[in-house]
Amino acid sequence: CLATNIVNAVSFGPVLITNGEPAPPETLASSVNPRTAIAQRADGAIIMLVIDGRQVHSIGATYQDMGDLLLDYGAVNACNMDGGSSTVMHYGGEYVNSCSADNGQPRPLPNAFLFK
C-alpha cells in the first residue's frame, strides 16, 4: 500500500484479540491442537506463543485458550498463525518446543519470523 508505506505483510487467522478486546467466543470454535500465535502489547512489545500438542506432555490448545493466555500477558492485538506440525520455535540455535510431526522432527517451512 503506497498510501500507508507498507512494504511487507502477512496474513493469518483467526484474529484472537483486537484493540484489547477478545474475539467473540463463537468465532473461536476449535478443537485442541498445536498452536502458534503472534501478538502485540500496548507498549509495542511482540509476544510469540507456541503450544505443543498431540503429545503426552501437551494435548494442545483451542483458539480461546490462546486468546485468554495472550490477554494474561498483556496482548492488545493477537492473531493465530499456522499450527499443527508447523508449530515450531527455534531460539538460540535450537528448537525449544516438541514438534508434533509423526517423526518428531520439524518439517521444512517456507516462511519464518526472524527477530534480531
Image (spheres, helix red, strand yellow):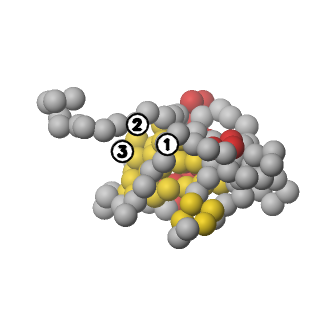
Whether residue 107 sits left or right of residue 79 in the image: it is right
Q: Which mark is residue 19?
A: 3
- In front of the other: 20 or 84: 84
**Of all residues shown, which one is farthest toward the left?**
3
Instruction: Report, in whole angstroms, how far the alpha carbon at label 3 lies from the one at label 2.
Output: 19 Å
Q: Earlier in the sequence, mark 1 or mark 3?
A: 3
Q: Against 4, is 65 above or below?
A: below
- Asked where in the image residue 91 lies, by quadrant, the reply is bottom right
Q: Badge 1, how many Cα within 10 Å: few under 14, some, many 20+?
A: few
Whether residue 10 sits left or right of residue 54 in the image: it is left
> In the image, residue 102 lies at what x, y percent?
81, 45
- In front of the other: 45 or 96: 96
Residue under label 2: 10
Residue ID at (58%, 57%):
89
Q: Nearer the viewer, mark 1 or mark 3?
A: 1
User: At label 1, which amino acid type do we have?
Assistant: Asn
Residue under label 1: 111
- Asked where in the image residue 114 lies, by quadrant, the reply is bottom left
